[in-house]
């Protein structure tokens, strides 16, 4: 029987909440990750199709026994990898309530629709966008960038793309991002049919920001070759170093060149709350991707796309013909992106944004940035580490580099220590490549991380580094 009695639902629900509350209680004392035992991995990989049913109590307990102990690790204060935050606890409860209500937020006159509008209005306000801009919540940053660039494609083909595809222009259209632009921009350009040969990856300066001279030169070269420059996809917080491209200069250039100005703010967009001066020009973007499941601490999934010209966004995706549109009624979200049935993602944001307010978010984001600065200062005072890049947000790129170890050995050493640290799980960190060098990359989007956790991270890395060095000599 699929249905549960209200009493059984209550009993199971309380148990589920207890499991998560116990996890919160002990999160500091637990390793960030623990190795997944072979037997548990095998059990999942070869789990037979369940022919008959079982007791739901068993399933809740098997979550506690077999899934919860082997997390990705991002609830832990010592998780520094990628851009994955712990979830705001109230948002976890909101996920339960949203699923319990289970509306489709394609649109229509029911509460979830208006909650999403409320949240979108708040996000527009934070980002300096007008309230009449178009917008939808999406699955994440990749989807948000794709949806935004889809509107760009619609505009730059004068709408013909919907009927005739991408091939109607006299010459190929060209899109520009930096060498530090996120891979999802390239994916979007490929999916949208431009082809990545027409995505120019512009070099960056010493601060990993898009080099404006190189951008101008490349646009001129492309025009001279008969190509059609259509869009700059800038970053407001690159994933590698947190660099923010010169947004104001790009806005000016796009204006002068009649190009679409898109900003990928999936990681760093909401950093505007803490460091508004770094974001001058952002509000001039034609479209913007932000990702509340990163720095607004929403449980995955929750992205957001905003497009200045709501009518363009609707025209790019709506299948309601203009002659039957009721422009007096509120348009459905499904007219503004590719999804029809849509989950109630807005509830979690609606709750947490009210719980802590913009002031609370400003403090949390500022605190993460301050922690990153502290980590950078600690690295600089130690003899065994080298600071490689410190962006203005919360990413630190560094290496284990004790004096006297030749450059040729350092990459191997850092790779080896990373493997050990990731396997052991006392802290979790990943790497990236900058100027051809492998570097450790610590990103702090974590309201649980403390100064002490930074010391643990460096100690764990140094210990693994010493062992790797000893093993290599
Ligand atoms: C700058 C940037 N853009 C886009 C993305 C992709 O976002 P998502 O993983 O939510 O699809 C990320 C993810 O880390 C990112 O950091």
Image: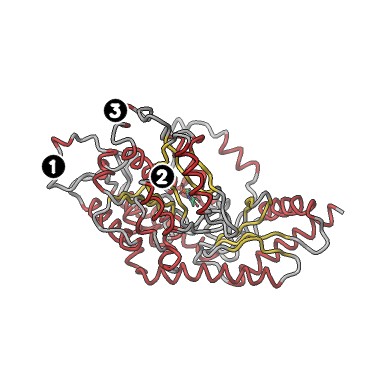
Examine the rendering and report whether any part of residue 15 can be seen: no
Q: Nearer the viewer, residue 84 or 21?
A: 84
**Model colouring:** secondary structure
Q: Nearer the viewer, residue 342 or 377?
A: 377
Q: Are marks 1 and 2 in contact (CB under 8 Å)?
A: no
Q: CA distance from mark 3 to mark 1?
A: 23 Å
Q: Residue at x 46, y 67 (%)?
A: 365
Q: Earlier in the sequence, mark 2 or mark 3?
A: 3
Q: CA distance from mark 1 to mark 2?
A: 32 Å
In the image, which disc is placed on residue 163?
3
In the image, which disc is placed on residue 433?
none
Percent position of residue 412, x then y: 76, 50
Q: Find disc 1 in the rendering and name its residue.
A: 326
SS assignment at label 1:
loop
- The response on whether ligand 1 sits within 8 Å of label 3 is no
Q: Is residue 385 left or right of residue 107?
A: right
> Quadrant of the rendered structure where residue 166 is?
top left
In the rendered view, tell whether residue 175 sits above or below residue 71.
above
Examine the rendering and report whether any part of residue 393 can be seen: yes
Q: Earlier in the sequence, mark 3 or mark 1?
A: 3
């Amino acid at each position: 029987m699929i249905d549960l009695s209200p009493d059984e639902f209550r009993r199971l629900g309380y148990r589920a909440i207890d499991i998560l509350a116990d996890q919160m209680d002990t999160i500091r004392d637990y390793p960030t990750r623990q190795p997944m035992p072979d037997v548990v991995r095998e059990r999942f990989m070869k789990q037979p199709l369940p022919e008959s049913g079982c007791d739901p109590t068993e399933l809740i307990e098997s979550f506690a026994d077999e899934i919860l102990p082997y997390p990705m690790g991002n609830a832990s204060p010592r998780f520094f990898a990628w851009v994955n935050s712990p979830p705001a606890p109230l948002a976890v409860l909101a996920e339960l309530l949203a699923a319990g209500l289970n509306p489709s937020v394609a649109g229509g006159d029911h509460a979830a629709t208006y909650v999403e509008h409320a949240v979108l209005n708040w996000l527009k306000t934070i980002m300096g966008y007008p309230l009449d801009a178009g917008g939808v919540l999406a699955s994440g940053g990749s989807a948000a960038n794709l949806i935004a660039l889809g509107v760009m494609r619609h505009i730059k083909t004068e709408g013909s793309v919907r009927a005739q595809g991408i091939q109607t222009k006299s010459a190929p259209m060209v899109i520009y991002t930096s060498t530090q632009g996120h891979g999802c921009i390239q994916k979007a350009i490929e999916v949208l049919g431009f082809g990545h040969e027409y995505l120019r990856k512009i070099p960056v300066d010493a601060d990993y920001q898009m080099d404006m001279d190189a951008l101008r030169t490349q646009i001129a070269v492309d025009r001279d070759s008969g190509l059609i420059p259509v869009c700059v996809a800038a970053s407001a917080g690159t994933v590698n170093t947190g660099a923010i491209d010169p947004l104001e200069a790009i806005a000016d250039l796009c204006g002068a060149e009649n190009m679409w100005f898109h900003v990928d703010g999936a990681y760093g967009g909401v950093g505007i709350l803490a460091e508004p001066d770094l974001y001058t020009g952002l509000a001039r973007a034609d479209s913007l991707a932000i990702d509340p499941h990163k720095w607004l601490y929403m449980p995955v999934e929750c992205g957001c796309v905003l497009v200045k010209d709501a009518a363009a966004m609707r025209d790019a995706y709506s299948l309601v013909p203009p002659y039957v549109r009721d422009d007096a009624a509120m348009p459905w979200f499904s007219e503004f992106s590719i999804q029809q049935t849509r989950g109630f993602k807005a509830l979690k944001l609606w709750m947490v944004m009210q719980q802590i307010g913009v002031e609370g978010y400003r403090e949390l984001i500022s605190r993460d940035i301050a922690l990153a600065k502290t980590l950078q200062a600690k690295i600089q005072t130690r003899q065994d580490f080298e600071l490689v890049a410190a962006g203005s947000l919360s990413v630190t790129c560094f290496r284990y580099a004790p004096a006297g170890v030749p450059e040729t050995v350092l990459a191997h050493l850092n790779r080896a220590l990373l493997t050990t640290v990731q396997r052991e799980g006392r802290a979790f960190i990943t790497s990236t490549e900058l100027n051809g060098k492998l570097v450790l990359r610590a990103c702090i989007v974590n309201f649980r991380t403390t100064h002490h956790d930074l010391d643990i991270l460096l100690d764990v890395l140094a210990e693994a580094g010493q062992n790797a060095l000893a093993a290599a000599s």
